[in-house]
Amino acid sequence: MKKGIFLVIAILSINLIQGQDYKFGKVSQAELEEKHHPLDASASASYLYKNRSSFFEYQEGEGFRLITEIHVRLKIYNPKGFDYATKTVSLYKSGPRYEKFHGLKAYTYNLIDGKIEAYKLKKDAVFSTEASFYRDETKFTMSNVKEGSVIEYKYRIVSPFATNVNEFKFQYDIPVKKLVARFQAPEYYKFKTNIKGFLNVMPTKEIRADQINFTDKSRGYKNHVFKTSFQSSKLEFNKHIWKYNLSDIPALREEPHVNNINNYRSAVKYELSSIEFPNTVIESFASSWDAVVKKIYMNPNFGTQLDKSNYYKDDVNILIEGVTDPLKQVALLFNHVKSKVKWNGYYSKYTLNGVRKAYKDRVGNVAEINLMLTSMLRYAGINANPVLVSTRKNGIPLFPTREGYNYVVSSVELPNGVVLLDATSKYSSPNILPFRVLNWEGRIIRKNGSSDLVSLYPNQKSKTTISMLANLNENGDLDGVVRTIKTAHKAMEYRASYIHRDKDEFLEKLEHKYDGIEISELSVKNELDLAKPVVETYNFVIENQTDIIGDKMYVSPMFFLTSTENPFKLENREFPVDFGYPSTIKYRINITLPKDYLVESLPDSKRITLPENLGAFKYVVVNKGDMLQLIVDSTINTSIISPEYYVYLKEYFKQYIEKENEKVVLKRIEP
């Protein structure tokens, strides 16, 4: 969507739209009768009203707590919107401290014979679970939901983590009719305001007086009588308030090949820069990348872990004894960690139980595995350093913040460049990182405190070569053999999906991918030899692969391998297309034609190129006697394509798919 298509209004007044009542429980008949969103008929649901208020509340004996209150009213237009009747609330925890979920009120409203019926959420529809070591979840599902329902709920979260304010989101994957948000903080907390997204979102600001009342209790003897006395005092201060009042916010929907849609979602993040209480030393937080790096490295669960080596010395000494080639040492240590320590699935840039325990127990989180690897490489005399990463799901760290990084990999700096290593994946290899890590740039942290950005995207192309040798009979049925060779990231992804999977289940999934195909004699070579490409071979039989009209047969020469849908559908796009890595796919297809048919016409050969050498497509089909030979090559030369080239990319795929679907015309020979 282009800027300016929708008007998003930020105004001083906190009055709601005239004639609309957003008080909890005051759902109108007009809201229930609405059949579709007036500005987005494709929406399956919409937020009629979203209200978030986050503020600080002083608890005597504990200090400031962060309170967040949520009120949502949501309209469901059709069955695709039923998913919005389930809400999951994530609650952060750390040691004995944790966020608390309170005060849930929730109703479903339906219009029955012209009368509004309300259904209260039942207690047994609310579930609390432990999502991970750091997060719990509270989930609830509304009852009696159907097309046309309006659901409404409100709750509050009490957080002891007063320095960590969750992002204020203004844009969602469904449209929002009305959004009100407020953030207020005492003057002692200094925040930076980081705004992202394409909407023009500006808050109104004000300062108000506030106070904290204290009660001091004392006990002692007075006039020979033991008494308890109370004395009141107060602390006056100012609080800063930011208000947002927005209307008719368009949906931000997922598109193919987006690294994380949240990177482009309109939102504001309040990042704490310092705490300045009266008569105390100012506590400063990260305000630059240098400060961020220093804080992270000094954490005992990061930098200190790199200095520990006694737990692995004997193993490493034996492993690299007599090996002088640094690259061979890197390979040996990389493979040693991958085979020795299993990843437990937890992301973190900090260790949880420490590298020593992870090595002993043979299991650890991301930091424990990759900091351990970095330490071993340094012990061997190799110039190795950790690299801070924000995974694709975590988004891109646009501003200096410790929370921006949630992962760490290892790096080796060589004269001809940096080699990146991630030992959490059994099937990764040097510079072939798991897809979750391919997210713009990481930050190398060195012993001397310096840091540099390094691209996480690979330069090496991932290649897929598909060869098919098949026979086409006079009924339009096809049988033959397919051989597929995959390298680099394509090989890593294949190994991850194949090696630990039930082989019957894997075969069923492959047959489901090509509907109607019967596969036999499936074999896979080099699945465990990461230095070689993965090679998959199978025999197949599939029916009805042509259209037969009279004495002519119309054949798509790629058959079941043909692409059918352009992944890019938006007219324009404001965010980059992220493929993750450059890639090439090649088809080499040889078809033996039915003996009673000759080729009457062939599609023309075609070449397509993208600007700036971003990609190219080649299509060539020829007839040699009773053989039909097809060569198709498609290459994307870069991991990311800027939105300015989106129109060309969309047209590229359009022509690519049209060409793949063109027909060869065969004509029956008269006896």
Image (cartoon, helix red, strand yellow):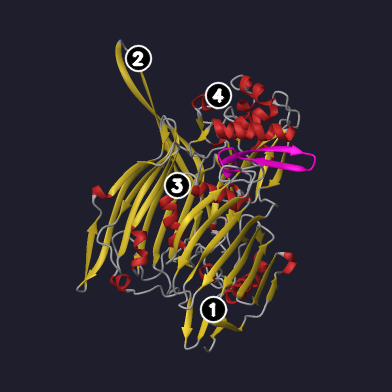
Question: Percent from the top left, x then y, of residue 322?
Answer: 73, 24
Q: Amino acid at mark 3?
A: Arg
Q: Secondary structure at mark 2?
A: strand
Q: Amino acid at mark 2?
A: Gly
- In the rendered image, which residue does mark 3 sit on? 501
The circle on residue 595 is 1
Can the viewer see residue 630 in this picture? yes
Can the viewer see residue 565 in this picture? no
- In the rendered image, which residue does mark 4 sit on? 356
User: Label 1: few (<14), some or many (≥20) within 10 Å?
Assistant: few
Q: Is residue 18 above or below residue 227?
A: below
What distance separates the C-alpha of mark 3 from that of mark 1?
42 Å
Bounds of the magenta segment:
401-428
Q: Where on the picture, by quarter, is residue 188?
A: top right
Q: Secondary structure at mark 4?
A: helix
What distance separates the C-alpha of mark 2 from that of mark 1?
112 Å
Residue at 33 percent of width and 43 percent of height: 128
Is 434 displayed left or right of 378 in the figure?
Answer: left
What distance separates the C-alpha of mark 2 from that of mark 4?
54 Å
Chain-order first, disc 4 or disc 3: 4
Please, which residue is most extreme toward the front here?
A: 671
Question: Percent from the top left, x then y, of residue 370?
Answer: 60, 35
